[in-house]
Image (spheres, rainbow, N blue to C red):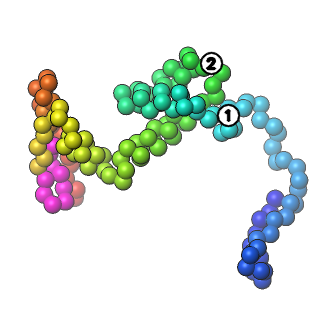
Amino acid sequence: MLIYKLLDTEPDCPWRLEVKDGHHNHVPSINPSVHNVYSKRTQAQKNIIKSVSRSGVAPKQILTAIRHQDSDTLIAPTNIRNDRTVIRRNYLMDRTPIEALLDELSTSLEWNFDVKKDSKTVFTISFLHTLNRSNCSARIPMPC
């Protein structure tokens, strides 16, 4: 198949499609898992991926849990990693991870925190959980 743009054409249809050879250039796939249409996640599977990802569980362990529920699923670890990337991007909403952390700490009643920063750089975030009184500190490297 050949697709190309014509130079001297009407503005409403500047493209032309020509089929040079109508045959496939490969043999049919044996395994359906190579086709994205078969690796679509159900809403229940999406919920599992989202909830378990928050706990820091690896994609291969998430896949094992999903396969226990549905042994015929064709989901691959790559699909789970891609879903996790989308979940993270949606959660961050164009914020940096540090900005998201500060937003979470400032809206939570369970955390007391202090931030040491100048106008551009966060140097230290100290936070204390109100229930178990464990003090945590995260050091952020300064940019060069």
Which residue is tagged 2? Answer: 71
Crowdedness of circle 1 by 10 Å Cα count: few (<14), some, many (20+)? few
Residue 127, x across and y down, in percent: 14, 36
Which image quadrant is residue 112 in?
top left
Where is 42 relative to 8, above or below?
above
| Residue at image location 31% in from the left, 50% down from the top | 96
Q: Amino acid at mark 1?
A: Tyr
Residue 54, x across and y down, in percent: 37, 31
Q: What kind of element bears circle 1?
A: helix
| Residue at image location 13% in from the left, 47% down from the top | 115
Crowdedness of circle 2 by 10 Å Cα count: few (<14), some, many (20+)? few
| Residue at image location 10% in from the left, 26% down from the top | 133
Quadrant for the C terminus in the image: bottom left
Residue 139 visible to the viewer: no
| Residue at image location 88% in from the left, 49% down from the top | 23
User: Spatial distance from mark 1 to mark 2, Cα to Cα?
Assistant: 14 Å
> Magenta includes 125?
yes
Return the residue nearer the eye: 62 or 51: 51
Left or right: 103 in relation to 33: left
Residue 7, x across and y down, in percent: 75, 80
Q: Which residue in the rendered view is the most extreme toward the top?
A: 68
> Magenta includes 33?
no
Q: Magenta segment, which residues?
A: 117-126
Q: What kind of element bears circle 2?
A: loop
Whether the residues at callouts 1 and 2 have beta carbons within 8 Å, the answer is no
Return the residue nearer the eye: 45 or 77: 45
Return the residue nearer the eye: 93 or 20: 93
Which image quadrant is residue 28 in?
top right
Magenta span: chief secondary structure = strand
Which image quadrant is residue 70 in?
top right
Residue 3, x across and y down, in percent: 77, 65
Which residue is tagged 1? Answer: 38
